[in-house]
Amino acid sequence: MVKVVESKRDLNDFVYFIKKLYKDDLHYIFPIFSVLKKELFTLVLKAKKYKAILSVRENKVVGRLLYTIEFNKKKNRFICYFSAFDAINDTEVAKELFNYMELDVINQNVLYCEGTFSPYDPDTRRGILVDGFDDDPAVLTSYNAPYYSNLIESCGYYKAYDNFGLKADINSQVQKRLETVETYFDNHYDVRIDQINLNKLDNDIHDIHEVLLTATTEINYQEAPSIEMIKQVAENLRLLINPKLIRIARENLTNKPVGFCLVFPDFNQILKKTKGRIRPIYILINLKKITRVRGTMQYVIPKYQNTGLIGYMYKKVYDHFDSMGINEFEGGTVMEENEKSLHAFDKFGGRIAKTYRIYGKELKS
């Protein structure tokens, strides 16, 4: 039976289902449940922008799914984007959830579904993990049991495209390459790299949004997020922000923002121990034990693309790794067709470590 989430009690069932589903998994890291509940309360119960559904058997939750409808300018059509798909290893459960979603969106004249994407920020936690199950997920990445792809494919979904999770070595050779990029850029461009300023966060968010609007290209699967969305993401991720690791590039002459990169300490290394709870003292005590960072986003306006600006920004971040005890860097997910980014990462000792799949399905009215 499918149950629509319509109350706080239903929402609790939706949020905490994964606690039972993954209680024995060695790699799964629970989200901060209080934050997740707050997000979903706004999305599902208050704004009603998303619909959340549960699959229930004998009064027990055995699956869940979250979805929304948005207009995609690139494809010039409305699309159903789904996320938070979790279920026991049972194709009937998956079919029950996806059939309900599909009938619902067909009734709204929407004939294509695609996912998984994270609410708010589709650059994080996107795709079903299909390769790379032997490692803990880094912060803001997805993780799921290996059988998920079979469940989704049993519902008639096919690969839309893959995203690759990338890792890079941190060593003297990479350091020298970044220093070369820094020297070249300094000699050819009058651009400075600023740390994000938490005291002027609204100004920095405005600049990040300006870069996103200008840098969006045909390789991106959707338009730039709104300032309101960026502010919401920043608020949700405030705990993860280390100003040394988040950089905005600005022209010295005009003070115009021309690029940015977002790098976060891998708080999952701490949250794995807290089991989805916020324990501020424990987190503060263990901050220095974080040894991995993740670069979630990097964008440069067209004028500075292929100039080495991305490498220049990351050099400024890289300079702090040694003092922070960082020995591992994981990049943001890169779409398989984005050959420029894959090649650039490869030049700095990068390699594909994980594969996340976006699934799609054309529906019949």
Image (cartoon, grey):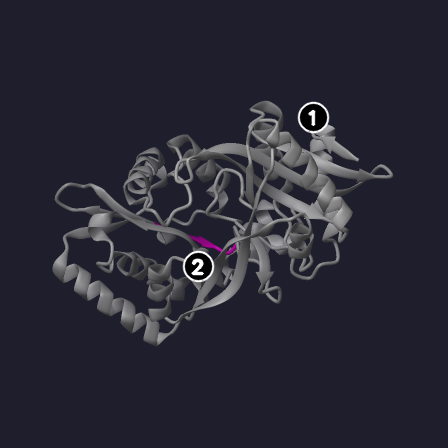
Q: Amino acid at mark 1?
A: Glu
- Which label number is shown at residue 33? none
Task: Give the vertical position of 122 relative to 185 (above or below).
Answer: above
Residue 187: image quadrant is bottom left
Q: Residue furthest bottom?
A: 173
**Residue toward you, 3 or 297:** 3
Task: Give the vertical position of 133 relative to 243 (above or below).
Answer: below
Please tell me which of labels 1 and 2 falls first in the chain.
1
Q: Position of residue 234 (x, y in %)?
A: 44, 39
Query: Horizontal placement of 118 versus 180: left or right?
Result: right
- Which residue lies at the image location 53% right of the left edge and 32% below the top edge? 69
Q: Quadrant of the N terminus?
A: top right
Q: Which residue is mark 2?
A: 336
- Which residue lies at the image location 50% right of the left edge and 39% below the top edge? 236
Q: Residue furthest right?
A: 58
Query: Horizontal placement of 169 versus 209: left or right?
Result: right
Query: Horizontal placement of 248 versus 232: left or right?
Result: left
Q: Position of residue 72 (x, y in %)?
A: 44, 36
User: Can residue 247 be spotted in the picture?
Assistant: no
- Which label number is shown at residue 6? 1
Q: Bounds of the magenta span?
A: 261-266
Q: Residue furthest top?
A: 46
- Which residue lies at the image location 64% right of the left edge and 36% below the top edge? 102
Secondary structure found at label 1: loop
Q: Position of residue 201 (x, y in %)?
A: 35, 37
Query: What crowding class fits label 1: few (fewer than 14 Cα within 10 Å), some (14-19), or many (20 or more)?
Result: some
Q: Report how far apart the C-alphas of labels 1 and 2 lie in the structure.
A: 38 Å
Q: Quadrant of the C terminus?
A: top right
Secondary structure found at label 2: loop
- Which residue lies at the image location 21% right of the left edge and 52% below the top edge? 304
